[in-house]
Amino acid sequence: MADKLIITFNQYTKIVEKLAVEIHKKFKPTVLVGIMRGAAPILDILSRILKLPIAYIVIQSYSGKGMEDKQGELMFAREISSLANEKDFKKVLLIDDLSDTGLTLNKSIEWLKSYPQTKDYIQEVKTACLWKKKSSTFEPDFCPVRLDSDPWIVQPTEHYEEISIDEIIKRN
């Protein structure tokens, strides 16, 4: 098992703020597109800081039984979820929480550039994530934390995957 990098909510928001500054200095996107689920909190914070419309791409990696820790075939939702109009997609900033292998970001760029409703409007796509693992072959355009190893990153909300609604009811 890989080492764990445990991130507090305060650390998380500071990294997102560093990402926002990096983006603001070097790129003027017209829309933020997040890869769900990992990008959801990042997208929320960045859209508030940068005052930009957002869109979501939902992707699932299916690995099959006994392969839960491995990257499987990527399945994309049929549609982008967004209230941004087509013309907002001129300069896209594609966001994920991390670059692990790089496959998700690479395939998402391809998918986005061929998506019928926006492909004719996209002039530029840049990428952003909070962490790039050492073994990732993908080089994001914006990334405040470049790791010198490949730890399991335990994000601030990840513990909810291990807890039941009944346990939360008891606590509240």
Image: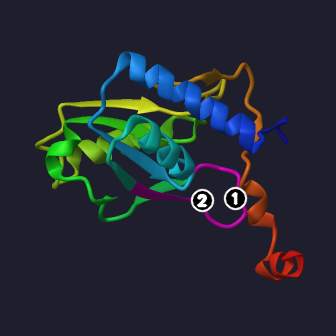
- Going 49% across and 29% down the picture, which residue do you hit? 20
Element carrying mark 1: loop
Inspect the image, locate mark 1, and give the three-letter code of the amino acid beneath it: Glu
Q: Horizontal and vertical percent for residue 69?
A: 71, 52
Q: Is residue 134 visible?
A: yes
Inspect the image, locate mark 2, and give the three-letter code of the amino acid beneath it: Ser
Label 1: which residue?
68
Q: Which residues are magenta?
A: 57-71
Depth check, front residue: 36 or 135: 36
Say few, some or many: other residues with alpha carbon within 10 Å of mark 1 (under 14 / 14 to 19 / 20 or more).
few
On screen, residue 172 versus residue 158, left or right, reads right
Q: Horizontal and vertical percent for residue 116?
A: 16, 54
C-alpha span from label 1 to label 2:
6 Å
Q: Which label belongs to residue 63? A: 2
Asked if disc 1 and disc 2 are in contact, CB closer than 8 Å, the reply is yes
Quadrant assignment, res 63: bottom right
